[in-house]
Image (spheres, coloured by chain):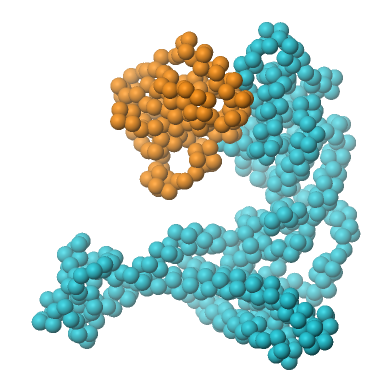
Amino acid sequence: MFASKRLQKELSKMQGKLPPGIEVVKAEDFSEWLMDIKVVDSNPLYAGETYRLKFAFSSNYPIEAPEVVFVQTTDRPIPWHPHIYSNGIICLDLLDRQGWSPVHNVESICVSLQSMLTSNTKKERPPGDENFVRYNTQRPRDISFVFHDNQV
Amino acid sequence: MDSDDGFNSSQVSEDEFMEDQDSDVSLGEDSDFEMDQDDVGFESQDKDIKPSKHAYEIEFTVYSPAQIQSHQDKQIDEVSNILGQPPESTAILLRHARWNKERLIDQYMEKTEETLESAGLGESAENNPPRLEKVKGFVCDICCEDDPDMFTFAMKCGHRFCVDCYKQYLYTKIKDEGEAARIRCPGDGCNRIVDYKSLNLLVSDSLRDRYQELLMRTYVDDRENLRWCPAPNCVYAVQCGVKDRELARVVPTVHCDCGHFFCFGCSLNDHQPAPCSLVKKWLKKCEDDSETANWISANTKECPKCHSTIEKNGGCNHMTCRKCRHEFCWMCMGVWSEHGTSWYNCNRYEEKSGSEARDAQARSRQSLERYLHYYNRYANHEQSAKLDKDIYLKTEKKMTQLQNTTGMSWIEVQFLDSASQALQQCRQTLKWTYAFAYYLARNNLTEIFEDNQKDLELAVENLSEMFEKPIDQLKGLKVEMMDKTSYCTKRRIILLNDTAENLKNGNWDFIVQL
């Protein structure tokens, strides 16, 4: 109830106008949305590509952060980034309990992710990606990432 | 970035903070206050009677929740008087300063306004108590509602939200996330802590109780010399002076009033004689390796030439290594070309190339076998301790039976109880001696250690065996059993004293860095 009211408002606001490079793909209910984002400047790492984000909301959204991951489809790869695992899990303080503020919304998360990609120059995965992807069974919100470097 | 880091960086650097804590001489003084006289039970008397402390024992004190609370209140009172702030604000300041009152007082005297501000108590919190307001044209950033009749709330930082959202936010933080002392304003990037008065205005009584409980927990969590007993449902905390950096030299096992033995350094169950860092390494290794290593050992051999591990899952004895194309016989490990005509039926055990290959294999398997040697014994004692625990549960029954069938009194059957407890404790120690030994480099000391280990093991097995005896024989075995029990205990003390002393003096050589 808490979440649906707010999401309803977010949706109607987004249907009016969205920043460049952000699109709503699917928002039929108030538990899971799909969004597409593009990096709008000319970063060669991400030029010409579109990425798909999956948002999962708990009933307590926006008090609780949504669970946000990149998902892979035939024409939607997982972007290269030292904080994005190859299974789409994102390590961003904004999405963590400590860094989340209920003032954020779907749009502002998309914008943050866009700028996280824009400023990156490394075609890298996080250290230990292979192991993490193979063995991780936790949901993104329960993983305690160490935000050890805020440079990228 | 967890909340702790955020907090520190706004105050002082991590290093400075640690230094402060180390030089905090008041910790010792505080602990004396009244606590010792409060609660002189059997435990503490026992400790007094003991002639001297063993080398493996350390000083510690167990506190009940009421004692922790009064400890806390007393400090708040004291600092409140010095600063001239009301107790509620002082409590917030102290929590914000992680109970380092010297540093708080210094800071407060130097920069009063800044100190108050950073703890979320900025100017005139006194004259201007928090209140709910209706604000014209307000839109809540959380729920996006703009009803003009809606009550709203903001702290001094000015981040205003509707009351419902604020309440929901606090409820989630307290109930779901277990936060208390450092709940921040819901505004993005705002570091203002929600103070007690604001909280009071917004939350229900039951939530407030939970909040208080969590606040008390943070007191223990924040103090380096206090730690909660990790036993399920235990409410006690233990105070001990052993610091993190001393953990390579001492294994600080403490004994909570609830009966649980645990390590003050890492909160795991008592793991003497192995130091915390070895325990961590060992547990990780076992988790990663033990099953794999067992399987490799049981099902594979190595290529005599390139040492690749090979599983033979069918077919004849003529092996060709996938990696280096070396051809050999699975049975004798010798070169296949020397097999002559006796193909597919190896009876050439004495062949020279075969025995050399087997030797080489044996050597390269040594490290694996070495690990398994220690692991199997470690695991065995763990398993046996579990079985002994079952016996312990049956012991009570046995004790009643014994009272009924032999007419022995309750006090006369207590020997079974103490035997079973000694057994548990010794097994726990033995278990960790194997992890300890795995990481030991060989020298003269290890011989003594292994002798001690052997003696203890023998004593334990002897005692353990007696538990298997039927009830009717137990009465006759009483004296022998008591002897064996005290012998076990004695052997354990000898072993632990030896390891603890050498650890303290840095005499052990480990094959890994502690």
Residue most extreme to the left: B341
Q: Is residue B242 visible?
A: no
- Residue in front for this viewpoint, B32 or B38: B38
Does residue B426 sit above or below A60 in this rendering? Answer: below
Residue A122 horizontal/vertical position (percent): 36, 32
- Residue in front for this viewpoint, B360 or B376: B376
Using residue B499 as the reference point, say whether residue B127 is left or right of it.
Answer: right
- Residue in front for this viewpoint, A126 or B413: B413
Which residue does the image show at 56% across and 36% down from the upper left? Answer: B1
Which residue does the image show at 76% across and 53% down from the upper left? Answer: B235
Residue B64 horizontal/vertical position (percent): 81, 54
Does residue A68 sit above or below B18 in this rendering? Answer: above
Does residue B151 sit above or below B497 in this rendering? Answer: above
Does residue B351 sit above or below B93 in this rendering? Answer: below
Q: How many marks do you count on the picture?
A: 0
Question: Chain B's colour?
Answer: cyan
Residue A141 horizontal/vertical position (percent): 53, 37
Q: Quadrant of residue B175?
A: top right
Q: Quadrant of residue A116?
A: top left
Question: Chain A's colour?
Answer: orange
